[in-house]
Amino acid sequence: MSTNQDKEVLEKQSFSYQLARAYIPWQRYTNRWDPLEGLTKGTIFPELYMPYQPYRTP
C-alpha cells in the first residue's frame, strides 16, 4: 500500500522523457505453414522461425 509520502515523491518526479521506442522494419512474408505446424513451431511464417539453441562451449 502506498503512503502519502510515496504519492508526493511520484508527483515531484518528471516523466516527460521517453523510456523506449520500438523499431520494427517492414517485412514481406512469402510462405506460410499450415496452422498445425505453426502451433508446433510458434509461428506460421518460416522467415520468423528461430528455434532456441543454447550456448555450447567448445
Image (cartoon, rainbow, N blue to C red):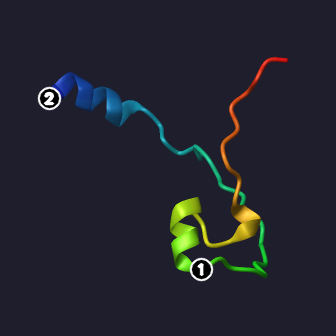
Does residue 33 lie above or below 50 as drawn?
below
Question: Which element carries disc 1, helix, strand or loop?
Answer: loop
Judge whether 11 appears above or below 37 on screen: above
Task: Tell me which residue sits at (33%, 36%) in the image.
Answer: 11
Res 7 → quadrant: top left
Q: Position of residue 34 (x, y in %)?
A: 59, 80
> In the current view of this chain or complex, which residue is farthest to the top?
58
Q: Residue at x 32, y 26 (%)?
A: 9
Give the crowd class for mark 1: few <14, some 14-19, many >=20 residues within 10 Å: few
Which circle marks residue 34 in the picture? Answer: 1
- Give the Cα separation between the discs numbered 1 and 2: 49 Å
Q: Nearer the viewer, residue 29 or 39?
A: 39
Element marked by disc 2: loop
Residue type marked 2: Met
* Quadrant assignment, res 58: top right
Q: Position of residue 4 (x, y in %)?
A: 17, 27
Q: Position of residue 15 (x, y in %)?
A: 48, 41
Q: Which labelled disc corresponds to residue 1?
A: 2
